[in-house]
Image (cartoon, rainbow, N blue to C red):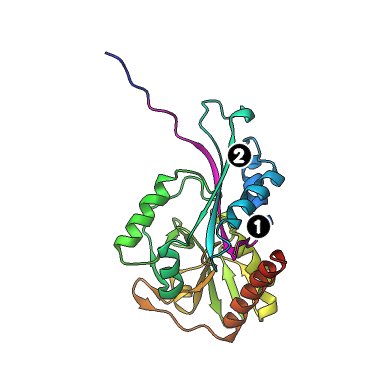
Amino acid sequence: MIEMLSPPSPLGLFETILAIRGHCVLEAHHVERLRSSAECLGLPTPPPVQVSEFIRESAALIGHLDEGVVRCSWFTESEDPDDASRWKLEASSGRLPALVSTRRESGRVVVLDRSFVRAMPRFKMIGDPARSLATHAIQGMGADEGLYIDSSGNILEGASTNVFAVDGAKLRTPPVAAGLLPGTVRAWVIANGADAGYDVEEAPLRREDLLRGSFLTSSLTPIAAVRSVDGIATSGLDKRYQELVRLFESSADGAADRSSR
Protein backbone atom coordinates (compact mmCIF):
# COMPACT_ATOMS: atom_id res chain seq x y z
CA MET A 1 0.00 0.00 0.00
CA ILE A 2 1.40 3.39 -1.02
CA GLU A 3 1.10 6.09 1.62
CA MET A 4 0.09 9.43 0.15
CA LEU A 5 1.67 12.37 1.92
CA SER A 6 -0.08 15.73 1.84
CA PRO A 7 2.05 18.80 1.18
CA PRO A 8 3.08 20.71 4.32
CA SER A 9 0.82 23.55 5.37
CA PRO A 10 2.36 26.99 4.97
CA LEU A 11 4.04 28.39 8.05
CA GLY A 12 4.06 32.14 8.26
CA LEU A 13 2.63 35.48 9.21
CA PHE A 14 0.38 37.99 7.52
CA GLU A 15 -0.83 41.58 7.76
CA THR A 16 -4.11 43.05 6.56
CA ILE A 17 -3.95 46.74 5.80
CA LEU A 18 -6.61 49.32 5.03
CA ALA A 19 -5.99 51.10 1.72
CA ILE A 20 -7.58 54.48 1.09
CA ARG A 21 -7.46 55.50 -2.57
CA GLY A 22 -4.41 53.30 -3.04
CA HIS A 23 -2.59 54.44 0.11
CA CYS A 24 -1.98 51.96 2.94
CA VAL A 25 -2.94 53.34 6.35
CA LEU A 26 -0.25 52.91 9.06
CA GLU A 27 1.91 51.10 6.52
CA ALA A 28 5.17 51.46 8.45
CA HIS A 29 3.58 49.98 11.57
CA HIS A 30 2.39 46.92 9.66
CA VAL A 31 5.78 46.42 8.04
CA GLU A 32 7.50 46.61 11.42
CA ARG A 33 4.99 44.26 13.08
CA LEU A 34 5.55 41.66 10.37
CA ARG A 35 9.33 41.92 10.81
CA SER A 36 9.31 41.95 14.61
CA SER A 37 6.83 39.06 14.82
CA ALA A 38 9.08 36.87 12.67
CA GLU A 39 12.09 37.88 14.74
CA CYS A 40 10.31 37.17 18.03
CA LEU A 41 9.38 33.67 16.79
CA GLY A 42 12.94 32.97 15.70
CA LEU A 43 11.97 32.85 12.01
CA PRO A 44 13.75 34.44 9.05
CA THR A 45 12.69 38.08 8.80
CA PRO A 46 11.32 39.75 5.66
CA PRO A 47 13.26 42.68 4.18
CA PRO A 48 11.26 45.80 5.20
CA VAL A 49 11.97 47.67 1.95
CA GLN A 50 10.69 44.76 -0.12
CA VAL A 51 7.60 44.39 2.10
CA SER A 52 6.77 48.07 1.52
CA GLU A 53 7.25 47.68 -2.23
CA PHE A 54 4.93 44.67 -2.39
CA ILE A 55 2.30 46.43 -0.28
CA ARG A 56 2.38 49.61 -2.34
CA GLU A 57 2.24 47.75 -5.65
CA SER A 58 -0.84 45.84 -4.50
CA ALA A 59 -2.46 48.99 -3.10
CA ALA A 60 -1.95 50.79 -6.42
CA LEU A 61 -4.11 48.15 -8.11
CA ILE A 62 -7.10 49.28 -6.03
CA GLY A 63 -6.38 53.00 -6.16
CA HIS A 64 -9.78 53.54 -7.77
CA LEU A 65 -11.51 52.37 -4.57
CA ASP A 66 -12.22 54.75 -1.71
CA GLU A 67 -11.40 51.85 0.60
CA GLY A 68 -9.86 48.46 0.01
CA VAL A 69 -7.69 45.89 1.73
CA VAL A 70 -4.13 44.72 1.13
CA ARG A 71 -2.97 41.39 2.53
CA CYS A 72 0.77 40.78 2.80
CA SER A 73 2.05 37.29 3.70
CA TRP A 74 5.52 36.04 4.66
CA PHE A 75 5.60 32.25 4.61
CA THR A 76 7.35 29.00 3.78
CA GLU A 77 6.18 25.54 2.76
CA SER A 78 9.55 24.02 3.55
CA GLU A 79 9.93 21.42 6.29
CA ASP A 80 12.94 23.43 7.46
CA PRO A 81 11.68 26.85 8.61
CA ASP A 82 15.26 27.97 9.26
CA ASP A 83 16.02 27.85 5.52
CA ALA A 84 15.66 31.56 4.71
CA SER A 85 15.96 30.86 0.97
CA ARG A 86 12.61 29.04 1.00
CA TRP A 87 10.60 31.91 2.48
CA LYS A 88 8.30 33.87 0.19
CA LEU A 89 6.68 37.27 0.28
CA GLU A 90 3.30 37.77 -1.37
CA ALA A 91 0.74 40.58 -1.41
CA SER A 92 -2.76 40.83 -2.82
CA SER A 93 -5.51 43.41 -2.72
CA GLY A 94 -9.26 43.73 -3.12
CA ARG A 95 -12.48 45.15 -1.75
CA LEU A 96 -13.28 45.29 1.94
CA PRO A 97 -15.00 42.13 3.26
CA ALA A 98 -18.72 42.60 3.82
CA LEU A 99 -18.31 41.61 7.47
CA VAL A 100 -16.13 44.69 8.06
CA SER A 101 -18.81 47.06 6.79
CA THR A 102 -21.44 45.33 8.92
CA ARG A 103 -19.23 45.51 12.01
CA ARG A 104 -18.75 49.24 11.52
CA GLU A 105 -22.47 49.88 11.21
CA SER A 106 -24.04 47.41 13.63
CA GLY A 107 -21.44 46.88 16.36
CA ARG A 108 -23.12 43.71 17.67
CA VAL A 109 -20.71 41.98 20.06
CA VAL A 110 -20.93 38.73 21.99
CA VAL A 111 -18.67 37.46 24.76
CA LEU A 112 -17.29 34.04 23.86
CA ASP A 113 -17.04 31.27 26.45
CA ARG A 114 -13.73 29.78 27.55
CA SER A 115 -13.92 26.97 24.99
CA PHE A 116 -12.69 29.50 22.43
CA VAL A 117 -8.95 29.94 22.90
CA ARG A 118 -6.03 31.14 20.75
CA ALA A 119 -2.69 29.36 20.67
CA MET A 120 -0.53 32.37 19.80
CA PRO A 121 -2.65 35.50 20.20
CA ARG A 122 0.23 37.98 19.83
CA PHE A 123 0.88 36.99 16.22
CA LYS A 124 -1.15 36.99 13.00
CA MET A 125 -0.41 33.42 11.93
CA ILE A 126 -1.40 32.03 8.54
CA GLY A 127 -4.05 29.32 8.64
CA ASP A 128 -5.18 29.77 12.25
CA PRO A 129 -8.05 27.24 12.64
CA ALA A 130 -9.05 28.51 16.09
CA ARG A 131 -9.72 31.98 14.71
CA SER A 132 -11.67 30.57 11.74
CA LEU A 133 -13.85 28.47 14.05
CA ALA A 134 -14.49 31.45 16.33
CA THR A 135 -15.47 33.65 13.38
CA HIS A 136 -17.88 30.97 12.14
CA ALA A 137 -19.46 30.68 15.59
CA ILE A 138 -19.78 34.46 15.96
CA GLN A 139 -21.64 34.75 12.67
CA GLY A 140 -23.88 31.89 13.74
CA MET A 141 -24.82 33.91 16.83
CA GLY A 142 -25.91 36.81 14.62
CA ALA A 143 -23.06 39.01 15.89
CA ASP A 144 -20.37 41.06 14.17
CA GLU A 145 -17.58 40.28 16.63
CA GLY A 146 -16.87 37.96 19.54
CA LEU A 147 -14.66 38.72 22.51
CA TYR A 148 -12.30 36.23 24.13
CA ILE A 149 -12.04 36.07 27.92
CA ASP A 150 -9.40 34.75 30.30
CA SER A 151 -9.90 32.26 33.13
CA SER A 152 -11.10 35.07 35.42
CA GLY A 153 -13.68 36.35 32.95
CA ASN A 154 -11.68 39.42 31.96
CA ILE A 155 -12.18 40.61 28.40
CA LEU A 156 -9.10 40.19 26.20
CA GLU A 157 -9.80 41.05 22.55
CA GLY A 158 -12.03 40.24 19.63
CA ALA A 159 -11.48 37.58 16.99
CA SER A 160 -10.39 40.37 14.64
CA THR A 161 -10.27 43.46 16.84
CA ASN A 162 -8.97 45.08 19.99
CA VAL A 163 -11.46 46.64 22.40
CA PHE A 164 -11.62 49.83 24.48
CA ALA A 165 -14.04 50.73 27.27
CA VAL A 166 -15.05 54.34 27.82
CA ASP A 167 -15.89 55.82 31.21
CA GLY A 168 -16.23 59.57 30.82
CA ALA A 169 -12.77 60.88 30.03
CA LYS A 170 -11.10 57.57 30.90
CA LEU A 171 -10.25 55.08 28.16
CA ARG A 172 -9.17 51.55 29.07
CA THR A 173 -7.94 48.62 27.01
CA PRO A 174 -6.50 45.26 28.13
CA PRO A 175 -2.69 45.07 28.28
CA VAL A 176 -0.86 43.09 25.60
CA ALA A 177 0.74 41.03 28.37
CA ALA A 178 -2.71 39.57 29.13
CA GLY A 179 -2.49 37.72 25.79
CA LEU A 180 -3.65 39.69 22.80
CA LEU A 181 -2.52 41.11 19.48
CA PRO A 182 -0.75 44.49 19.65
CA GLY A 183 -3.03 46.10 17.07
CA THR A 184 -1.78 48.96 14.93
CA VAL A 185 -4.92 51.07 15.44
CA ARG A 186 -4.91 50.14 19.13
CA ALA A 187 -1.41 51.63 19.35
CA TRP A 188 -2.58 54.74 17.48
CA VAL A 189 -5.47 55.27 19.94
CA ILE A 190 -3.15 54.87 22.94
CA ALA A 191 -0.73 57.39 21.44
CA ASN A 192 -3.36 59.92 20.32
CA GLY A 193 -6.26 59.51 22.72
CA ALA A 194 -5.17 62.50 24.79
CA ASP A 195 -5.71 64.75 21.75
CA ALA A 196 -9.40 63.81 21.89
CA GLY A 197 -9.62 64.48 25.63
CA TYR A 198 -9.09 60.94 26.89
CA ASP A 199 -6.90 59.65 29.70
CA VAL A 200 -5.79 56.29 28.26
CA GLU A 201 -4.62 53.35 30.34
CA GLU A 202 -4.03 49.62 29.87
CA ALA A 203 -6.07 47.75 32.47
CA PRO A 204 -8.35 44.67 32.77
CA LEU A 205 -11.90 44.97 31.43
CA ARG A 206 -15.14 43.27 32.39
CA ARG A 207 -18.33 42.84 30.42
CA GLU A 208 -20.08 45.55 32.46
CA ASP A 209 -17.34 48.02 31.50
CA LEU A 210 -18.23 47.57 27.85
CA LEU A 211 -21.91 48.19 28.49
CA ARG A 212 -21.10 51.67 29.83
CA GLY A 213 -19.60 52.57 26.45
CA SER A 214 -16.99 50.89 24.26
CA PHE A 215 -15.51 50.62 20.79
CA LEU A 216 -13.52 48.21 18.64
CA THR A 217 -10.32 48.90 16.72
CA SER A 218 -8.56 47.03 13.93
CA SER A 219 -6.71 47.73 10.72
CA LEU A 220 -9.87 47.48 8.65
CA THR A 221 -12.55 48.60 11.11
CA PRO A 222 -10.63 50.97 12.09
CA ILE A 223 -12.60 52.52 15.04
CA ALA A 224 -16.22 51.41 15.51
CA ALA A 225 -18.67 51.82 18.38
CA VAL A 226 -19.94 48.74 20.19
CA ARG A 227 -23.73 49.09 20.12
CA SER A 228 -24.69 45.93 21.99
CA VAL A 229 -23.04 43.22 24.08
CA ASP A 230 -24.83 39.86 24.20
CA GLY A 231 -27.93 41.61 22.92
CA ILE A 232 -27.90 44.34 25.58
CA ALA A 233 -27.61 47.90 24.24
CA THR A 234 -24.56 49.84 25.37
CA SER A 235 -24.54 53.45 26.54
CA GLY A 236 -23.83 56.02 23.87
CA LEU A 237 -20.42 57.57 23.27
CA ASP A 238 -19.89 61.31 23.68
CA LYS A 239 -18.11 63.98 21.66
CA ARG A 240 -14.68 62.76 22.74
CA TYR A 241 -15.26 59.54 20.80
CA GLN A 242 -16.42 61.49 17.75
CA GLU A 243 -13.28 63.63 17.97
CA LEU A 244 -11.10 60.51 18.21
CA VAL A 245 -12.69 59.10 15.04
CA ARG A 246 -12.29 62.47 13.31
CA LEU A 247 -8.60 62.64 14.24
CA PHE A 248 -7.94 59.16 12.89
CA GLU A 249 -9.84 59.75 9.66
CA SER A 250 -8.06 63.08 9.20
CA SER A 251 -4.64 61.50 9.63
CA ALA A 252 -5.50 58.63 7.28
CA ASP A 253 -7.04 60.91 4.62
CA GLY A 254 -4.16 63.36 4.89
CA ALA A 255 -1.61 60.62 4.36
CA ALA A 256 -3.57 59.35 1.36
CA ASP A 257 -3.67 62.81 -0.16
CA ARG A 258 0.06 63.30 0.32
CA SER A 259 0.85 59.95 -1.27
CA SER A 260 -1.12 60.83 -4.39
CA ARG A 261 0.78 64.03 -5.10
Q: Which residue is mark 2?
A: 41
Q: Residue at x 44, y 55 (%)?
A: 151
> Earlier along the polypeptide chain: callout 2 or callout 1?
1
Could one spot residue 231 in this view of the protein?
yes
Residue sitting nearer the eye, 117 or 71? 71
Is 238 a magenta residue? no
- Rounded to the nearest whole Å, what is the CA distance between mark 2 and mark 1? 22 Å
Element marked by disc 1: helix
Which region of the structure is painted magenta? 6-27
Q: Which residue is mark 1?
A: 27
Q: Position of residue 134 (x, y in %)?
A: 38, 54
Q: Position of residue 43 (x, y in %)?
A: 62, 35
Residue 175, quarter of the rendered image: bottom right
Residue 257, quarter of the rendered image: bottom right
Q: Position of residue 123 (x, y in %)?
A: 55, 48
Amino acid identity at mark 2: Leu
What is the crowding at mark 2: few (fewer than 14 residues within 10 Å), some, or many (at least 20)?
few
Amino acid identity at mark 1: Glu
Quadrant of the image containing the N terminus: top left
What is the crowding at mark 1: few (fewer than 14 residues within 10 Å), some, or many (at least 20)?
some
> Relative to residue 63, is residue 232 depicted above or below?
below
Is 24 a magenta residue? yes
Quadrant of the image containing the C terminus: bottom right
Taking the image as shown, residue 104 lies to the left or right of residue 222, namely left
Q: Residue at x 52, y 28 (%)?
A: 78
